[in-house]
Image (cartoon, rainbow, N blue to C red):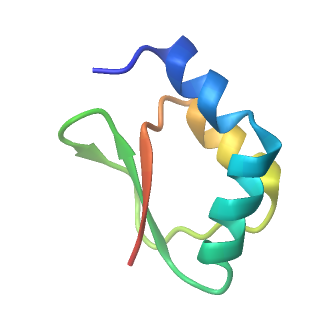
Amino acid sequence: MLTLSETLSYYKRRDVQKLILEYAKGKEIGVRFGEEVFGKRPDILVYENDILESAKRGCTSFTLL
């Protein structure tokens, strides 16, 4: 399992944020917290900072739905 520090070091990268936002534009996303916990639906990403803020709350991955 990833530590919060590892997750933040990845998702704070601007290139990662831009790429995720590009693919997520206009789509619903799923947010995963660890191995078995998912975030609420529906969820969308509007700003690059949305990705980092989700990571700060413990998000470990994003899935396009």
Residue 4 appears in view: yes
Left or right: residue 64 versus residue 22 is left
x 68%, y 80%: residue: 25
Which residue occupies the extreme left position in the image?
36
Q: Nearer the viewer, residue 37 or 22?
A: 22
Q: Residue at x 52, y 26 (%)?
A: 7
Residue 60: image location, x then y, percent: 42, 37
Determine whether 26 is above or below 64 in the image. below
The residue drawn where x is 61% and y is 75% is 23
Residue 26: image quadrant is bottom right
Is 50 or 18 nearer to us in this picture? Answer: 18
- Quadrant (top left/top right/bottom left/bottom right) for the N terminus: top left
User: Which residue sits furthest front?
Assistant: 15
Q: Which quarter shows the C terminus? A: bottom left
The image shows residue 54 at horizontal and vertical percentages of 60, 41
Q: Is residue 44 above or below residue 3?
A: below
Q: Is residue 58 above or below residue 28?
A: above
The answer to whether residue 50 is seen in the rendering is no
Report the residue that reaches farthest toward the bottom: 26
Question: Residue 4, percent across and down?
Answer: 50, 17
Give the number of callouts. 0
> Is 14 situated left or right of 20 in this image?
right
> Residue at position x 60%, y 74% from top?
24
